[in-house]
């Protein structure tokens, strides 16, 4: 999943980004509202963590703009991060379109839990655990198992599998994977997606059984759900 952090406190943004990346998220950063809207106009973020008090365009304006004119017609989830802790400010943030509100200072573990909660807000997704067939992925503990067998995945492999499991059976293009699993520093002309899908496929494989991730030539990849294969 891909997240945009928006805050004019560069040190804070950098610290949060490091923590979220350790949790397997792709993270981009913006230091003001104008930069945030520019990035959101061409990158389909899954979540935006948005400070309210910034020079120029503040977080309320950014949130309102994203809700009124969502990129590609799909508005990202928005988590407000702010030192403003009055009831009126929280109500205003929610009224302009924020999905959740976290007051500074906050513990990183609480931020991570709220991020997990917001990213689970898809039909049929509840709790911290994703289950597709015999695959089980815990977004809180980062434990992954296939048919009871524990899997040792890298952070990027975990993020990739989490994205596949959020869209079981769908054909997902390489461009879509770059948009949601990698950050803005990824080189779209490298074979990083193909290589990471390949290593994940091998770790999921069971002897004498078909692979759980299909390559659809010219289209992308698919986590197989038919025929009881997972």
Image: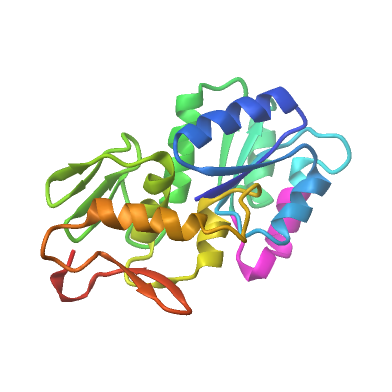
- Lateral position of residue 168 relative to residue 19, left or right: left
The foreground one among 42 and 197 is 197
Above or below — where is 79 with respect to 46?
above
Residue 169 pos. (x, y %): 32, 71
- Lateral position of residue 15 relative to residue 224, left or right: right
Magenta stretch: residue 70 in it? Answer: yes
Q: Quadrant of the C terminus?
A: bottom left
Residue at 68 percent across and 64 percent down: it is 70
**In the rendered image, which quarter is residue 46 located in?**
bottom right
Question: Most extreme residue toward the right, as rendered?
Answer: 56
Residue 205 pos. (x, y %): 21, 57
Q: What colouring method underlies this structural image?
A: rainbow
Residue at 64 percent across and 33 percent down: it is 81
Residue at 68 percent across and 35 percent down: it is 88
Magenta stretch: residue 214 in it? Answer: no
Residue 162 pos. (x, y %): 37, 52
Q: Is any part of residue 139 visible from this angle?
A: yes
Overall secondary structure of the magenta section: helix
**In the rendered image, which quarter is residue 55 located in?**
top right
- Lateral position of residue 110 relative to residue 228, left or right: right
The foreground one among 193 and 108 is 193
Residue at 70 percent across and 23 percent down: it is 11
Q: Is any part of residue 85 visible from this angle?
A: no
Residue 98 pos. (x, y %): 62, 47
Above or below — where is 72 with respect to 59?
below
The foreground one among 56 and 133 is 133
The span shown in magenta is 61-76
- Lateral position of residue 94 relative to residue 194, left or right: right
The foreground one among 20 and 175 is 175
């Amino acid at each position: 999943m891909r997240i945009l952090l928006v805050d004019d406190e560069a040190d804070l943004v950098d610290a949060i980004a490091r923590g979220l990346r350790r949790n397997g998220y792709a993270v981009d950063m913006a230091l003001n509202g104008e930069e945030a809207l520019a990035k959101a106009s061409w990158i389909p973020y899954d979540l935006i963590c948005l400070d309210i008090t910034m020079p120029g365009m503040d977080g309320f304006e950014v949130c309102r703009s994203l809700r009124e004119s969502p990129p590609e017609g799909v508005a990202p989830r928005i988590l407000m991060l702010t030192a403003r802790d009055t009831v009126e400010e929280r109500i205003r943030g929610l009224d302009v379109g924020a999905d959740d509100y976290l007051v500074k200072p906050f513990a990183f573990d609480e931020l991570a839990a709220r991020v997990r909660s917001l990213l689970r807000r898809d039909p049929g997704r509840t709790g911290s655990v994703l289950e597709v067939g015999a695959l089980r992925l815990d977004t809180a503990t980062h434990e992954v198992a296939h048919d009871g067998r524990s899997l040792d995945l890298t952070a990027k492999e975990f993020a990739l599998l989490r994205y596949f499991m959020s869209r079981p059976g769908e054909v997902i293009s390489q461009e879509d994977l770059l948009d949601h699993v990698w950050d803005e520093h990824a080189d779209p002309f490298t074979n990083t997606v193909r290589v990471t899908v390949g290593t994940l496929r091998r770790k999921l494989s069971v002897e004498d059984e078909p692979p759980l991730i299909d390559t659809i030539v010219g289209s992308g990849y698919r986590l197989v759900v038919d025929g009881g294969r997972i």
